[in-house]
Amino acid sequence: MRIGDIARQAGVSARALRYYEEQGLLTSERSPTGQRIYPASAVERVRLIQLLLTAGLPSRTILALMPYIDTGHGSPEAVELMAAERERISAAIAGLTAARDTLDRMIDIAHHPTSEHCPALREPPWTAYHADAATTAAAVPVTA
């Protein structure tokens, strides 16, 4: 099958297929004119690669898992690799959740400002910074 046929059936771009080949995830043969020729089984393999990418696995991890997938035999190493990726994803989720929560607090403060968070609401009110006043204050010697 040609690259366009595989791409259409698997629901990916031809560019994605070329990338998978560059990463060692997919192989093709070449026709006498240099066109990529894939076996029909490549459609299923590409769909699996897409599933693993959607699960958050980087291509280097997918490449490490492919021998286990190809043979149909799991191993403690494969399970450990997937568990490590899950931990990496969980840490990323925790970081994003913390960032979202901080942003939620900032949005709440913007909607409901208080003197604790907004200098303009303090007594005495906050005054704007003026460069000339700062220069004058710096020029006056401080005595103890």
Image (spheres, helix red, strand yellow):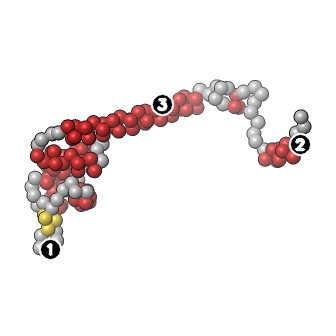
The residue under the point 74% across, 33% down is 126
Earlier sequence position, callout 2 versus callout 3:
3
Which amino acid type is shown beneath numbered disc 2?
Answer: Pro
Image spot of residue 57 (x, y percent): 28, 44
Q: Which residue is outermost to the front?
A: 76
The numbered mark at residue 141 is 2
State yes or no: discs 1 and 3 in contact (Cβ < 8 Å). no
Q: Nearer the viewer, residue 118 or 97?
A: 97
Q: Which residue is mark 1?
A: 33
Tag 2 secondary structure: loop
The residue under the point 13% across, 54% down is 42
The residue under the point 15% across, 39% down is 74
Image spot of residue 125 (x, y percent): 75, 30
Q: Nearer the viewer, residue 102 or 75?
A: 75
Q: Quadrant of the N terminus?
A: bottom left
How packed is label 1: few (under 14 Cα within 10 Å), some, or many (20 or more)?
A: few
13 left or right, relative to 134: left
CA separation, marks 2 and 3?
46 Å
How packed is label 2: few (under 14 Cα within 10 Å), some, or many (20 or more)?
A: few
38 left or right, relative to 61: left
Q: Quadrant of the C terminus?
A: top right
Q: Which residue is mark 3?
A: 101
